[in-house]
Amino acid sequence: MAAEVVIDARFVKTGLGRYTYNLLAGLAARQNPDFAIRAIVQRGSADPIASICGRLVVVDTPIYSLSEQIAILRAASGCDLLHVPHYNVPLLYRGRLLISISDLVHIMEPQVRRTAASWCYARPMLNLAARKARHVITVSEYSKQQIVEHLRITPAKVSVIYNGVGPQFRVQDRQECARRVSQSLDVQGPFLLYVGNLKPHKNLGRLLQALTLLRQRRLVDPKMLVVGEDAKWKSGLVEECARLGLQNAVRFVPYVSDEFLPVLYAAADLVILPSTLEGFGLPVAEAMACGTPVACSNAASLPEVGGDAVEYFDPYSVEDMATAIERVLSSSSRQAELRQKGLQQAARFRWKECVRRHAEIYRGLLGLN
């Protein structure tokens, strides 16, 4: 009988969800697999997973709850390896455990680490999960360094496996993509694009200030689409837009489909990621694969992902951020250079390789190598 790996796939509409979906899809496509896969899902998001994984267990208890601890323990019963792609591991689980930790935002970001949730849950759970796991997967050398330093585990216990970029993120006709964006979102003319959540470490407050600075100087006057939803932090950003007079320049779009996101990337004049802390920065890689210029901060993992193919700025300097945006938007030659280099850099990140590395670690933990 083949060994069985259980993967917790309850995260769906986040970067973590994209990671688990592509991991499951890639594992399902493997020829002659030497282990079977069982996925833990929530009922409302079971259908996409069911199309790529034949064995599902539904768990609808809240994430980060006490009931989750018992439910996941039961859902993983009888498996040979449990892979939890986050730090919310079942602490009573006694079998082989593999975890993925993409970043340490919950204990490193200043506005988060001082909260009760960080002290009472994230901090102890991260430490317990890292020690309990047989092995830890992370998404960048930067994140590995942070995990080793702050969770105090040996470097040999942590493997770096880069995220991938799906084939849907590709070069498309920009005019046609711009027409579709205009039709769907009523966005006319050139625009900047941000994709991600709205948490403090994403640094959107300074980005709004940089746009204001550009408008004051009358250097460039771009509109910006912010694609992401976060009930806790959105209202503050909307208020900041009003204070800065950006109500008509910045548009918040809570969600776009996976099918429409590549169109949005391809239509944008510049994709921006101003984060102060980032485990990988998937929008950077996806935008480059679509042939769109990228400007991002020179912090955390972003230089590792962007290489020499993006325009960098100091995320703590509004002046530097504005200058970087202006430098790209005002130079067609710089845009062409970033498009070419970006396509080459994005080719480094493929889900097929990501899945291969995961399968290799699974086999090692199962004693199949």
Image (spheres, grey):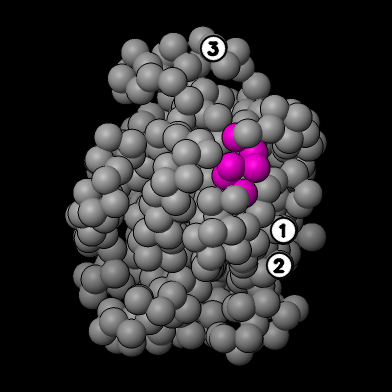
Q: Nearer the viewer, mark 3 or mark 1?
A: 3
Q: Would residue 297 be seen by someone viewing this image from the given angle? A: no
Mark 3 — residue?
A: 175
In the depicted view, which residue is nearer to us: 69 or 145? 145
Residue 1 in the image: state x and y as whole percent. 60, 51
Q: Amino acid at mark 3?
A: Gln
In the depicted view, which residue is nearer to us: 83 or 310? 310
Q: Based on the displayed image, in which of its 4 quarters is residue 46 positioned?
A: top left
Query: Earlier along the polypeptide chain: callout 1 or callout 2?
Result: 2
Residue 327 in the image: state x and y as whole percent. 65, 42
| Spatial CA span between label 1 and label 2 | 8 Å
Dot 2 and dot 3 residues touching (CB under 8 Å): no
Q: Check residue 205 for magenta coloring.
A: no
Left or right: residue 316 compared with residue 159:
left
Image point (42%, 46%), residue name: 216
Mark 2 — residue?
A: 141
Dot 1 and dot 2 residues touching (CB under 8 Å): yes
Residues shaded magenta = 324-329
In the depicted view, which residue is nearer to us: 114 or 367? 114
Residue 263 in the image: state x and y as whole percent. 49, 23
Mark 1 — residue?
A: 304
Q: Nearer the viewer, mark 1 or mark 2?
A: 1
Q: Based on the displayed image, in which of its 4 quarters is residue 77 positioned?
A: bottom left
